[in-house]
Amino acid sequence: MGFTLSNQQQLLSKIATGNGHGENSPYFDGWKAYDSDPFHPTKNPNGVIQMGLAENQMCFDLIQEWILNNPEASICTAAGVNEFKDIAIFQDYHGLPEFRNAVANFMGKVRGNRVTFDADRIVMSGGATGAHEMIAFCLADPGDAFLVPVPYYPGFDRDLGWRTGVQLIPVACDSSNNFKVTRAALEAAYEKAQKANIRVKGLLITNPSNPLGTVLDRDTLISLVTFINEKKIHLVCDEIYAATVFSQPSFISIAEIIEENIGCNRNLIHIVYSLSKDMGFPGFRVGIVYSYNDAVVNCARKMSSFGLVSTQTQHLIASMLSDNEFVKRFIAQSAKRLKTRHMRFTMGLAQVSTNCLKSNGGLFVWMDLRRLLKEQTFEAEMVLWRTIIHEVKLNVSPGSSFHCPEPGWFRVCFANMDDKTMEVALTRIRTFVLQNKEAIVPRKSNRLWHSNLRLSFQSRRMDDTMMSPCMMSPHTPIPQSPLVRAT
């Protein structure tokens, strides 16, 4: 007699069978659409292009060149095989000393050498996912909460809450001031938690922002530090996009702020870092917790036993990041190439009057499609998103999956593909926007315009789901924000 799915779930834990992973989110649904029909320039030119993955593939040629020139860095080559035994049998949860030193030095270089990091405070983890869960375990008990400004990375709900039982409380931010977090919004979120008898243990920020691609200015950072000091709660700073900032204003790490001696309690400050975004190594699962609190360092190091970075990876990373000339060249070239790609992509969108929030970091843009919504609701956003996924064949992420309070915003990743694929994706978006206009405006001919990619969209569906700004009801105004035309 076979077991039903319900029977099988009864044999498992509540955590294992719960929905805490968030796989039902549109953020992950878009990935499934891509996986079932992936784009290929020759084998599947009409497939879905992955623009929902914040991955940095802009400088893999530099990485490959370094590996070819340094075969001894890998213990799985003839040049490095003599190190195989020592590396393969050694696994201390403190991490290889040379690895921690190299990562600490790299973190300093990424921040323009304006701050230094202590290798003894480097705690490794299985990617930023493991690092966030580890810091949540260290700082909070089940039922406790972290404040998080919106919009924020959808994976935070899983990383900090699924297995820890920690809650995330959104801090209201909107387009009226480019989604900047304010002291008033922090106070409101904190007071709301207090009234609900929820203990707030910390504030989580992402700088540079995912999904906005913006950086926090010095005054805002000081305000955040002042706030957490007054409330006696922790500040967790996710800085995994630190080296993706490609133009002014420059990135300011929380490490710089606390070294300016503004009277903050260092025991409340913690940094999460990884090599997934800055170096483009998500598969290496190199995550870092850097805490200024000795007790947190000690606790996190013991917890890291459940998510260590393999010593083979540590060995390779230590060798690579210890090459100062390579690191200097990589950081410079990465910023240069990201700037070029960002400029090309946003200028292409601007040509069809599609704007993005002004940004200067990250691997994505925060695209504004509010004017394409039939009405300013999240239901309309979902209709638009499904059209983009299934007809335009682009996996972009809807703002609602990032807890954005305003419908019509989408995160679009541009650094996980080559130039030709990016141009195909840009052409599809431009075709879609222009096609949408033609579908709404009365025409003598009902014949649809086909792009050179043979993309076509049913005008009836476009008319049913979207309207131009001139056809919006006066009762559903589009929220205004200080956007800039993409340049």
Image (cartoon, rainbow, N blue to C red):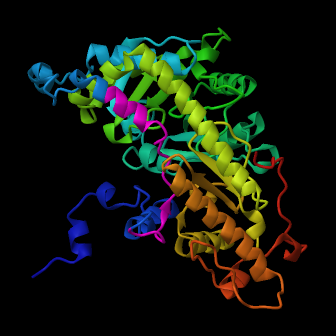
* Image location (x, y in percent) of residue 168: 54, 46
Q: Residue at x 59, y 70 (%)?
A: 388
* Image location (x, y in percent) of residue 127: 37, 37
- Nearest the viewer among 255 and 233 is 255
Quarter of the rendering occupied by the N terminus: bottom left
Badge count = 0
200 relative to 403, above or below: above
Q: Residue at x 75, y 82 (%)?
A: 439
301 relative to 178, above or below: above
Residue 345 located left or right of residue 127: right
Residue 136 located left or right of residue 388: left
Observer able to see residue 151: no
405 relative to 459, above or below: above
Residue 11 placement: quadrant: bottom left
Look at the image and say whether residue 413 sits in the magenta stretch: no
- Nearest the viewer among 443 and 277 is 443
* Image location (x, y in percent) of residue 332: 55, 25
- Nearest the viewer among 380 and 56 is 56
Look at the image and say whether residue 46 sits in the magenta stretch: yes
Quarter of the rendering occupied by the C terminus: top right
Residue 112 located left or right of residue 357: left
- Nearest the viewer among 17 and 480 is 480
* Image location (x, y in percent) of residue 359: 69, 40
| Helix, strand or loop: magenta stretch | loop
Residue 142 located left or right of residue 352: left
Magenta region: which residues?
A: 43-67
Q: Residue at x 25, y 67 (%)?
A: 9
Observer able to see residue 38: yes
